[in-house]
Image (cartoon, helix red, strand yellow):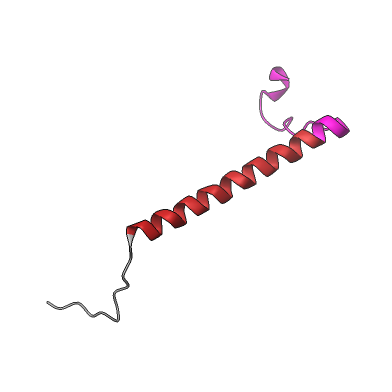
Amino acid sequence: MLLDGARTAPIRPYVLAAERADHERERERARQKRRRVALVLAADFGVDVDLHVVGAERAA
């Protein structure tokens, strides 16, 4: 059985690993950005954005 070269794309595992790492870095950047915004809102304006979390008022 022969493989059709036009229908099979060459995939290198290190390319996929790099793309996953880039995606994870983007997710971490977005998470850090949300944390910074929450900190600015709490510190500068007294807005506690974590009140919607169940039990957060006990921890604060």
Image quadrant in which the N terminus is located: bottom left
Q: Residue at x 63, y 42 (%)?
A: 31
Left of 27 or right of it: where is 17?
A: left
Q: Is residue 28 above or below residue 19?
A: above
- Give residue 38's quadrant in the image: top right
Is 6 colored magenta in this rendering? no
Q: Position of residue 54 (x, y in %)?
A: 66, 27
> From this viewpoint, which residue is outermost toward the left?
1
Q: Is residue 22 left or right of residue 50?
A: left
- Which of 45/28 is in front? 28
Q: Residue 50 appears in which quarter of the rendering?
A: top right
What percent of the width, then of the height, locates residue 55? Answer: 67, 23
Q: Is residue 16 above or below residue 4?
A: above
Location of residue 6 with respect to 26 vertically, above or below: below
- State the residue at coordinates (19%, 77%): 3
Q: Which residues are magenta?
A: 41-60
Q: Position of residue 11 (x, y in %)?
A: 33, 66
Residue lying farthest top? 58
Q: Quadrant of the C terminus?
A: top right
